């Protein structure tokens, strides 16, 4: 207590130069004690020393730390941040305890929580007003958004414990600021009050809602059980506060009011609040899963039968005010998208949070599509080629959301027609651009290129929104742009950003449609992919000139990585199509294996070891190679020498890699390669033929590739820290290698045994090797039963040698 009491005096002493370590340690001590006691015992601990309990002291201490924190928010005074984090965690432990005492929470706890929460709000409002004219550090603000929300959520936990006091308090605070704002005219400066409203709306959003972002609705427990069951809907404090914020928000629809009362920063808070509020309350229907969200994150399913719970589930339902609020929200969205050019944070919240929340539940989507306001948004999107002030990336989000909304329609024909109406102008624009005689000149102009990028982002968004109900219309869109995209790929072959977006669209189109398509449509899609890959190869896209400066080379590496990863995703998505021989109706159509084969020719020589260090690229590449070797080994055997050597070198790199998934896939690939060669040779065919001789990067001949992988796996097993969870894949790779390279295997084993100086150890190892290839009636076969027997032998072999001290 001497370290932290009286807290105000101690904090002032720290500011005057005293060490803060004891104060922070004292806060940690309170957290530790709260973690190992019940709330009632924690509160009683201080009664023997003071005329008040620990809860009361904790409230005063936290309030003083909050005051110190907000005063020094932009300074490097990290001790206040650490102390506040610890104290807020202590409150979460107390209120989230499964052993919490109800009497404590309705007396000392409730009183302390309400008093502290009021102090927190007043401190932040004061700080907001005093710093309203400070220049914002944008980078700092963006980086701290997550931390800010975590802290506000901690404040909300405290506020909810006395919800019947704190929510009316917030209503009064909010109403007072709005009333003051009503008196502001064009000659007044509302900056301070707007900044205060920003923080109030954020706090209201946190205390009223949970960020569930899903079909299950999360309503904080305290808001459902903290009020009298005799309340009418219009009297419920949560309803009153919700409508107060919504009524204020709708005032932004008037241009004159908006110019005075709504700064971009305040609009961000409004949009954020509406997104959270929509997820929690808007248009819930009978049968919707509603859960109590407790501070300890334990959820108990409820049906909303009690009065307070029922009010919160139905007060913005479909048959009451839900549609009115929904229309208001859509019009606020249109206003945000059209009236705040350059406000990227606001526009991102609108497209990626609020709009997404609206289309998340089908019953809301159904209402959306019948509203004039939504049709206004859809029409504006389809007619405007770059759609108001949105940056290109947000075009993707908006397109995805607009197409996703169609999932709520019961009639598939109507869903597809809605998508056609939205996306047809996009396809027409691209056809128009690609068909121009002066395309080579016009395409390089900045405005034309930006429009093409925006249209491509929209296509990507629509492709990503593909669902069974809208698949037909989205695929028609894809077919309509195939020829224009081929033309644009040629025109923009030197513009990496455009090339990447074209490939990315094709990746998402294949991913969303290849499993749905019949043979004819699959043939069209595969033929388009083949054409795309050949153009990419013919224009040397992805090549990096060694004459570039270091900085340009690094930038080129990044662009190359993005392209290659997208191409690998495309080839992997094509692999998901189970059948191959679908092109019998059209002898001129390529099959999927041919496309993947061409893609592997293109991609393999471009992938360096440096690029394989990117985890995502690494896994995509090894997954593709593994699949190709398992399903189409004869195709891989036909790769050019350059491409084949690159595949082998990559597998060699992958087996030595630390990523267990990469090693697993490489073992699968080696298994497929060796199994193919063994089966082919057994029937008198050539197998890997000329590719069997493995060459180093400088062209010096080396042992054959199967011998190389046999030696590599043996070294991994015997001398490395081999992981037992890889024993199955390793055994599958080792068995066909033993069949193909029996002489080499015997020589390697003999050399290894001769190096062991201890006779007893040498004898045990010899027995282990003997059992590996002879026990369990092992035969010279690659059928499933024999593989299973060898797996068992191999596991026993690893178990035996794992405890031996091998040289």
Image: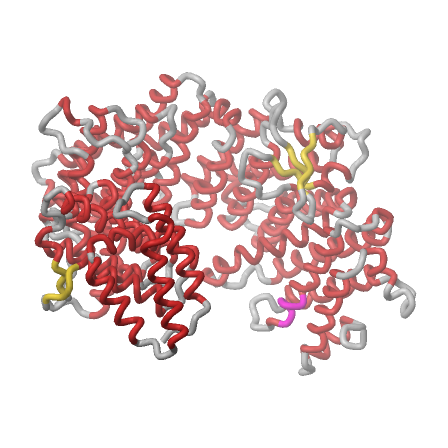
- Image point 38% across, 49% down: which residue? 776
Q: Position of residue 220 (x, y in %)?
A: 68, 41
Q: Nearer the viewer, residue 134 or 384?
A: 384
Looking at the picture, does residue 429 appear above or below residue 774?
above
Q: Is residue 555 visible?
A: no
Q: Nearer the viewer, residue 369 or 271?
A: 369
Q: Nearer the viewer, residue 548 or 392?
A: 548
- Image point 28% across, 33% down: which residue? 578
Query: Splitting the image into 4 quarters, where does residue 707 fall?
Result: bottom left
Query: Splitting the image into 4 quarters, where does residue 556 fall?
Result: bottom left
Q: Quadrant location of the C terminus?
A: bottom left
- Image point 78% across, 63% down: which residue? 58
- Most frequent secondary structure within the magenta stretch: helix
Looking at the picture, does residue 452 appear above or below residue 30?
above
Viewed as shown, does residue 798 lie left or right of 689? right
Q: Quadrant location of the N terminus?
A: bottom right
Q: Position of residue 726 (x, y in %)?
A: 39, 55
Query: Splitting the image into 4 quarters, where does residue 770 fall?
Result: bottom left
- Image point 32% across, 59% down: which residue? 614
**Magenta region, residue range:** 79-83
Q: Position of residue 723 (x, y in %)?
A: 42, 60
Viewed as shown, does residue 620 lie left or right of 57? left
Q: Position of residue 383 (x, y in %)?
A: 30, 30
Looking at the picture, does residue 495 appear above or below residue 502?
below
Q: Is residue 770 magenta?
A: no
Q: Nearer the viewer, residue 569 or 90?
A: 569
């Amino acid at each position: 207590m001497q370290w932290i009491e009286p807290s105000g005096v101690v904090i002032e002493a720290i500011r005057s130069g005293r060490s803060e370590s004891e104060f922070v340690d004292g806060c940690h001590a309170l957290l530790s004690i709260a973690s190992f006691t019940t709330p009632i015992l924690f509160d009683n601990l201080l009664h023997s020393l003071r005329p008040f309990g620990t809860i009361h002291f904790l409230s005063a201490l936290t309030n003083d730390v909050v005051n110190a924190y907000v005063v020094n928010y932009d300074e490097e005074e990290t001790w206040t941040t650490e102390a506040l984090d610890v104290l807020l965690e202590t409150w979460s432990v107390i209120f989230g305890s499964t052993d919490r005492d109800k009497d404590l929470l309705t007396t000392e706890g409730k009183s302390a929580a309400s008093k502290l929460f009021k102090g927190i709000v007043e401190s932040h409002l004061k700080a907001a007003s005093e710093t309203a004219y400070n220049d914002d550090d944008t980078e700092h603000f963006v980086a701290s958004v997550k931390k800010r929300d975590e802290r506000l959520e901690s404040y909300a936990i405290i506020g909810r414990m006395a919800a019947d006091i704190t929510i009316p308090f917030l209503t009064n605070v909010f109403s007072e600021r709005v009333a003051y704002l009503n008196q502001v005219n064009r000659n007044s400066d509302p900056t301070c009050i707007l900044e205060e409203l920003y923080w109030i709306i954020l706090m209201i959003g946190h205390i009223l809602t949970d960020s569930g972002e899903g079909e299950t609705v999360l309503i904080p427990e305290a808001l459902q059980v903290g009020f009298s069951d005799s309340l009418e809907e219009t009297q419920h404090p949560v309803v009153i506060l919700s409508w107060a914020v919504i009524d204020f928000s709708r005032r932004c629809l008037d241009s004159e009011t908006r110019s005075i009362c709504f700064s971009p920063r305040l609009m961000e808070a409004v949009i954020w609040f509406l997104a959270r509020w929509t997820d929690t309350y808007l248009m819930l229907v009978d049968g919707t899963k509603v859960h109590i969200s407790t501070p300890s994150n334990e959820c108990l399913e409820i049906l909303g039968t009690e009065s307070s719970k029922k009010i919160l589930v139905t007060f913005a339902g479909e048959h009451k005010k839900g549609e009115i609020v929904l229309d208001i929200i859509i019009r606020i969205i249109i206003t945000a998208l059209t009236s705040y050019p350059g406000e990227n944070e606001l526009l991102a919240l609108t497209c990626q949070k609020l709009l997404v929340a609206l289309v998340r539940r089908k019953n809301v989507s159904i209402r959306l599509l019948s509203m004039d306001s939504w049709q206004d948004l859809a029409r504006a999107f389809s007619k405007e080629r770059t759609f108001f002030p949105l940056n290109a990336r947000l075009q993707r989000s908006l397109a995805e959301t607009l197409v996703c909304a169609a999932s709520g329609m019961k009639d598939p024909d109507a869903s597809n027609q809605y998508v056609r109406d939205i996306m047809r102008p996009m396809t027409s624009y691209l056809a128009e651009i690609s068909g121009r005689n002066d395309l080579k000149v016009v395409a390089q102009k900045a405005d034309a290129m930006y429009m093409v990028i925006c249209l491509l982002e929209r296509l990507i968004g629509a492709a990503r929104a593909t669902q069974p109900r809208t698949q037909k219309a989205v695929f028609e869109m894809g077919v309509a742009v195939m020829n224009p995209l081929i033309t644009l790929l040629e025109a923009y072959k030197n513009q990496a950003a455009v090339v990447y977006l074209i490939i990315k669209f094709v990746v998402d189109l294949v991913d969303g449609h290849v499993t749905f398509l019949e043979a004819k449509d699959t043939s069209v899609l595969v033929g388009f992919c083949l054409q795309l890959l050949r153009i990419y190869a013919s224009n040397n896209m992805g090549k990096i000139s060694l004459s570039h400066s270091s900085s340009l080379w690094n930038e080129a590496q990044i662009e190359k990585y993005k392209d290659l990863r997208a191409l690998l995703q495309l080839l992997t998505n094509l692999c998901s199509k189970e059948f191959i021989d679908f092109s019998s109706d059209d002898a001129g159509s390529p099959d999927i294996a041919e496309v993947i084969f061409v893609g592997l020719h293109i991609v393999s020589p471009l992938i360096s070891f440096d690029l394989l260090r990117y985890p995502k690229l690494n896994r995509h590449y090894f997954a593709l190679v593994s699949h190709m070797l398992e399903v189409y080994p004869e195709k891989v055997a036909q790769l050019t020498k350059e491409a084949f050597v690159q595949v082998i070198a990559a597998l060699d790199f992958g087996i030595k890699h630390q990523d267990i998934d990469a090693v697993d896939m490489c073992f699968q690939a080696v298994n497929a390669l060796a199994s193919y060669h063994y089966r082919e040779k057994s029937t008198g065919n050539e197998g890997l033929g000329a590719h069997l001789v493995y060459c180093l990067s400088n062209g010096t001949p080396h042992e054959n590739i199967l011998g190389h992988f046999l030696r590599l796996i043996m070294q991994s097993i015997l001398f490395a820290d081999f992981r037992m969870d890889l024993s199955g894949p390793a055994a599958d790779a080792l068995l066909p290698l033993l069949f193909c390279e029996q002489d080499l295997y015997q020589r390697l084993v003999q050399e290894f045994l001769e190096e062991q100086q201890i006779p007893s150890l040498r004898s045990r190892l010899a027995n282990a090797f003997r059992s590996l290839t002879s026990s369990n009636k092992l035969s010279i076969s690659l059928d499933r039963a024999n593989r299973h027997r060898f797996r068992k032998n191999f596991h026993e072999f690893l178990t035996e040698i794992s405890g031996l001290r091998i040289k």
